[in-house]
């Protein structure tokens, strides 16, 4: 595991964008595993800026997102599909028909979860998976648990995650209680992983995740077992 520390969020965003840009130079038809939330917003801004300057090309990229809230369709401003459209997909030359986000309106989470994993396999797997981390150590929406859940599935969100994400909604009551998330097995199959996190609270979670034993109570700890993980953490 490679851990890079930066002073500011802006530096983190540029370094993360460098890693994605390199990936697309090396393999223009990469399958990118993408994340939402506040952590990657700066990185997406840098990538959009580079695209506008002709420095990065998304025309051959396929993307698969980590997660989506259950009950929200893609037009809902807090859905992760909407987030991806407005922060990246509508702003670069990616083919929208090759951008995949779990279906928040699923009526059969188990079936659709397995289909999502099969779809990722059929694409040849994820070349580079971007991750954030929650204050409880979740990656994707894999919350602390007694076991690691392998496949894409519907997860009930931890009260602390609902509270943390309430900042995007008008109240905590409006935050969906469940999300469809890639499983930890789906994430671990990615060829490379890039995790970005900011601030002391996240640094503490990551210290716990990476210094102790692999433990499903801190889902991010499973990354200790992956051969190619880069973590960028900023002080602020
Ligand atoms: C988002 C995701 C989540 C977030 C995590 C951190 O697609 O999978 O695991 O990465 O909740 O969120 P922020 O970056 O908002 O602190």
Image: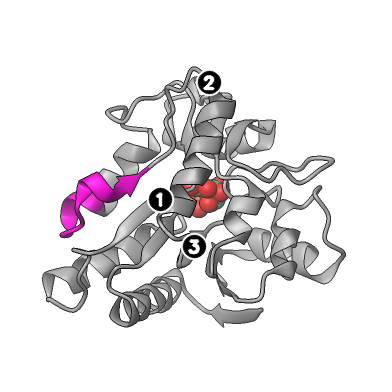
> Would the CB of label 1 be found within 8 Å of ligand 1?
no
- What secondary structure is marked by label 3? strand
Q: CA distance from mark 2 to mark 3?
A: 25 Å
Name the residue at 29% across, 68% down. Answer: 29
Q: Earlier in the sequence, mark 1 or mark 3?
A: 1
Q: Do the CB atoms of the residues marked 1 and 3 lie less than 8 Å apart? A: no
Q: Which residue is mark 1?
A: 64
Q: CA distance from mark 1 to mark 3?
A: 9 Å
In the picture, measured across the screen, residue 147 lies left or right of residue 119, that is right
Name the residue at 18% across, 59% down. Answer: 92
| Residue most extreme to the left | 53
Q: Sort mark 2 into few (<14), some (14-19) or many (20+) by Cα contacts within 10 Å.
A: few
Q: Nearer the viewer, residue 31 or 40?
A: 31
* Span shown in magenta: 89-100
Q: Sort mark 1 into few (<14), some (14-19) or many (20+) by Cα contacts within 10 Å.
A: many
Instruction: Identify the image quadrant of the N terminus.
Output: bottom right
């Amino acid at each position: 595991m490679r851990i890079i520390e930066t002073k500011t969020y802006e530096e983190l965003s540029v370094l993360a964008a460098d890693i994605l840009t390199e990936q697309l130079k090396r393999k223009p038809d990469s399958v990118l595993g993408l994340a939402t939330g506040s952590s990657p917003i700066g990185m997406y801004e840098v990538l959009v800026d580079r695209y506008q300057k002709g420095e990065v090309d998304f025309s051959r990229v396929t993307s698969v997102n980590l997660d989506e809230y259950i009950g929200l369709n893609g037009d809902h401003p807090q859905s992760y599909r909407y987030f991806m459209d407005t922060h990246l997909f509508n702003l670069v030359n990616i083919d929208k028909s090759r951008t995949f986000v779990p279906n928040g309106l699923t009526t059969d989470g188990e079936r659709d979860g397995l289909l999502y994993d099969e779809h990722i396999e059929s694409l040849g797997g994820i070349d580079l998976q971007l991750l954030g981390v929650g204050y409880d150590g979740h990656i994707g929406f894999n919350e602390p648990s007694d076991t690691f859940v392998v496949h894409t599935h519907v997860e009930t969100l931890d009260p602390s995650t609902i509270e943390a994400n309430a900042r995007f909604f008008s109240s905590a009551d409006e935050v969906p209680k469940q999300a469809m998330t890639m499983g930890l097995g789906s994430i671990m199959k990615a060829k490379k992983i890039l995790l970005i996190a900011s601030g002391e609270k996240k640094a503490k979670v990551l210290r716990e995740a990476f210094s102790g034993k692999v433990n499903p109570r801190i889902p991010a700890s499973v990354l200790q077992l992956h051969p190619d993980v880069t973590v960028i953490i900023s002080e602020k």
